Image (spheres, coloured by chain):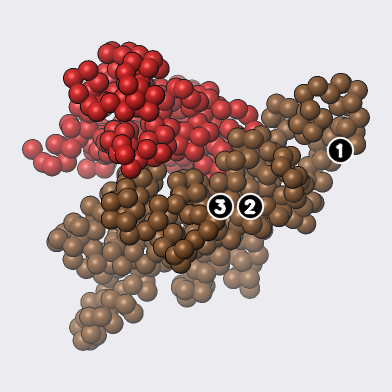
Chain colours: A red, B brown
Amino acid sequence: MRARDLFFWMGVGFLGFLVVLALFGPTFRHHYLERVGLPFEPPGARFWLGTDELGRDVFARVAYGARVSLTVGLIVQGLALVIGTVVGVLGVYAPRWVSNPLMRFTDGMFAFPDILLAILIIGVWKRGMVPVIVALAITAWPGIARLVRTQVASLRHREFVQAAQAMGASTPYVVTRHVLPQMVGLLLAVSMVELAGTILAESSLSFLGIGIEAPDPSWGSLIDAARVNMNAYPLLLLWPCLILSLSIFALNFVGDGLRERLDPRSR
Amino acid sequence: MRLARALVLRLLFGLLSLVFLSFVTFVADELAPGDAVTVLAGEKASEAEKARLREQLGLDRPWPVRYAEFVGKAARLDFGTSYYGIKEPVIDILRRDLPMTARLAAMAIALAAALGIGLGTVAALWENRWPDRVALTLSTFGVTVPNFVLAPLLVYVFSLQLELVPQVWSPVRTLPDISYLILPVVILSARPAALLTRLTRASMIETLKQEFIRLAIAKGVPPARLVLRHALRNAILPVVTAIGTSFGFLLTGSFIVERAFLLPGIGRETIEAIQQGNTPVLQACILVTGAMFLLVNLIVDLLLPVLDPRVREAQV
């Protein structure tokens, strides 16, 4: 087995663990919001990762962070995929007066630094999970749209697509039955890597204090809170940093592995 | 002249982006719940009072008029006054904060370019041998470890354990500024440096395979001169473009490090403005940060024809 394969399967395993953690972790042993012990208890049999400054179970809070990250990440990527695919296909098949301005707009949005737009949206709207999801979805779709556009533009002239068209198939039929299925593997792989970016962005916003609102924890706000007591209790800082970094690594490895497995051209 | 036309087009595109940016900033405020009147008149103000104030401030006019005014004022660096505190003009706040952010960004981009081009060149020269492996591993970490994880980690090691540098910036400083800024700059440059390493490596490997390099070797050009004058000069062009785009990561990072190290810059001001609902300050900060990003990319694009005669010849 090559090292790449090993990393791929380790990544898959870690993501599986993350899903289970997100589903059951926040209330498995203790509730993530309840003060169940003394402040700053060390890791042990009762509190696997110890307790935080208010005596809340760190394991449950880190697990809730996983739930936040996966929820935000999956919804944002889902929205970005839908919007990006529609815009990308329109960019190829729509009449010029639609596709040209649409793609210029997409390029403009793509060039705009993501975090600025997200901060602006959250800044004038409000804080919380919904604004974070909307802001990140608005910044995430242009990348997908550009990818879909170039892919569809090249697939459009392939024989099997031309053949379907020649047999009288309508454009929507050709796109949904012949063109898009060709791209599923690539899009899935790209989404994994983009998902890592979204999770990072959500954590960044929460770290800055404008993302998920307290008392609900997110990995970003857990890191921010742990910085205060960094000297005396560095372990509190370790857990969210560790799980976040591992998640980013895992998603990148899985994304690269998926691309290799599902997209024959990249081999 | 084609080059002149290309430059004018590039400038126009920059200007257009700036208009787009100002429009997004303006619209964002329009869509926001509540406006200046709700803040200035207070919660308890009657509807009649609010309407009068709205008329006074000119908020009852149609939005294209107000947008034109917004742009006109912003062009003269008039961003209004802060809603809170001593209600100081926003431009004074920017004047105070911009030097710190600009200093951080300039130092970080210089470090990232030096590290990225250096490591990338070394990796390409020893392709698939241990220096290459080390450079690639470092750059993988640089890309994947987020800066708000890197920040507490480095603070823990270098400030708390080794006590080499202060933990955070403070208004009263006992050491030279650089010892306060070294960690933020290193953290800020990690991601761009990693990306530039990968790009330089790829571009250099490609260049080293070309005919003119073989010719130079055959002619007996000394190795150092071969790498610096012949290979790197050709390989560096896509890297220069990437320095412009990676400036975007720097902006994101500057929000993080300014919070983590309590640095008084635009990033920290932006977050404060959001938390207070201080819209004029927020708008100005976003505009200025975005304008900085556009300016850096404009400079990079204008620099390319200077660096590369081929671009000069082939400008479209």
**Which element carries disc 2, helix, strand or loop?**
helix
**Name of the residue lying farthest toward the left:** A1
Please provide percent x and percent y for residue B259: 49, 45
Q: Quadrant of the C terminus of chain A?
A: top left
Q: Chain of mark 3?
A: B
Mark nearest the camera among 1 and 3 is 3
User: Foreground residue, A125 or A214?
Assistant: A214
* Alpha carbon separation for disc pair 3 and 2: 16 Å
Which residue lies under the disc numbered 2? B288
Mark identifier at residue B229: none
Q: Quadrant of residue A178?
A: top left
Q: Give the vertical position of A29 relative to B77 (above or below).
A: above
Please provide percent x and percent y for residue A19: 29, 21
* Alpha carbon separation for disc pair 1 and 2: 24 Å
Q: Quadrant of residue A50?
A: top left
Contact, mark 1 vs mark 3 (Cβ under 8 Å) = no
Mark nearest the camera among 3 and 2 is 3
* Alpha carbon separation for disc pair 1 and 3: 31 Å
Q: Nearer the N terminus, badge 3 or badge 2? A: 3
Badges 3 and 2, same chain: yes
Q: Nearer the N terminus, badge 1 or badge 3? A: 1
**Which element carries disc 1, helix, strand or loop?**
helix
Q: Quadrant of the N terminus of chain A?
A: top left
Please name the amino acid that badge 2 sits on.
Val
Please name the amino acid that badge 1 sits on.
Leu
Can residue A155 be seen from the camera position used here?
no
Please provide percent x and percent y for residue B8: 65, 65
Which residue lies under the disc numbered 3? B264
Q: Give the vertical position of A252 relative to A33 (above or below).
A: below
User: Foreground residue, A259 or B96?
Assistant: B96
Badges 1 and 3, same chain: yes
Which residue lies under the disc numbered 1? B57
